[in-house]
Amino acid sequence: MAKWADIVFCEWATHYLRWLSKKNYKNVLACRMHRFELDRHYDEIQWNNIDSVLFISEAMERKFHAKGNYKGKTFVTYDNLNFEDFPLIQKEKTMQIGMLGNIEPRKGVLEFVEYFGKMNLPEIKLSIAGNAKDAPYYGKIKRHIVENNFCLLYTSDAADEGLGVDL
C-alpha cells in the first residue's frame, strides 16, 4: 500500500507509522494520535515525515506540540456524537460535580482541581473519587484541596463502596 497509495492513513501511531515514517514513498502520510501513543510511541516516530496528525481534543494537540518541533499540519476532529440521540431530562440542580476515574498525571486531575479553585465557585461542590497509584501526585492534589477547602477527595476503596471520607 505504501508504494502505490497517494494517501496512507494510520489509525494508530504505533509500529506501522514508525516504519512508514522512516521510508520515503512520496505519498501523503497521516495518522490519528491517541493518548497512550503519545506516552508510549512518540519518540519512535519521525514526526516531520508525517504530513498530518489528527486529535480528538485541543488538550491532546497541545501535549503533542509540547513534546517536539513538529512542522506538519494538525487537526482536531471531535468524536462526533449526535446529541439528539440523548434527550435531556430536566433534573433538580444539586450544584455538585462528581469526577470518577484514575487519579494520575496523564488525566490532568491536578490541573482540573487548580482551575476549579481559581473559578471561585463556593456554591458548587466538587467530589473526586478514584484510584491513585502515584503517591506524590495524589499528595499534591490533596494539599491543594486541603489548603483551599473546596473539594472532597475519596480513595478508590471509598469509591468502590459508594462511601467517602472527607480528606
Image (cartoon, grey):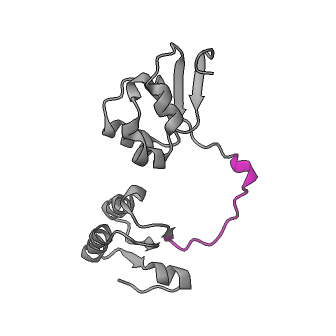
In the displayed structure, does residue 118 sit left or right of residue 12? left
Is residue 95 depicted above or below 58 in this figure? below
Tell whether position 90 is magenta: yes
Q: How many marks?
A: 0
In the displayed structure, does residue 116 sit left or right of residue 94? left
Q: Nearer the viewer, residue 98 or 93?
A: 98
Is residue 111 depicted above or below 93 in this figure? above
Q: Position of residue 101 (x, y in %)?
A: 49, 67
Q: Position of residue 108 (x, y in %)?
A: 39, 57
Where is the C terminus found, in terms of image quarters? bottom left
Which residue is depicted at the point 62% across and 17% down? Answer: 5
Q: Is residue 162 visible?
A: no
Is residue 166 depicted above or below 117 in this figure? below
Q: Position of residue 80 (x, y in %)?
A: 64, 42
Please give the range of residues in magenta: 82-97
Q: Nearer the viewer, residue 85 or 133?
A: 133
Q: Position of residue 32 (x, y in %)?
A: 53, 36
Q: Is residue 89 visible?
A: yes
In the displayed structure, does residue 75 sit left or right of residue 103? right
Which residue is depicted at the point 36% across and 64% down? Answer: 113
Main secondary structure found in the magenta portion:
loop
Q: Nearer the viewer, residue 39 or 55?
A: 39
Q: Nearer the viewer, residue 96 or 51?
A: 51
Quarter of the image where one finds residue 10: top right
Where is the N terminus found, in terms of image quarters? top right
Tell whether position 96 is magenta: yes
Which residue is depicted at the point 51% across and 15% down? Answer: 25
In the displayed structure, does residue 79 sit left or right of residue 105? right
Is residue 149 depicted above or below 27 in this figure? below
Which residue is depicted at the point 36% across and 28% down? Answer: 70
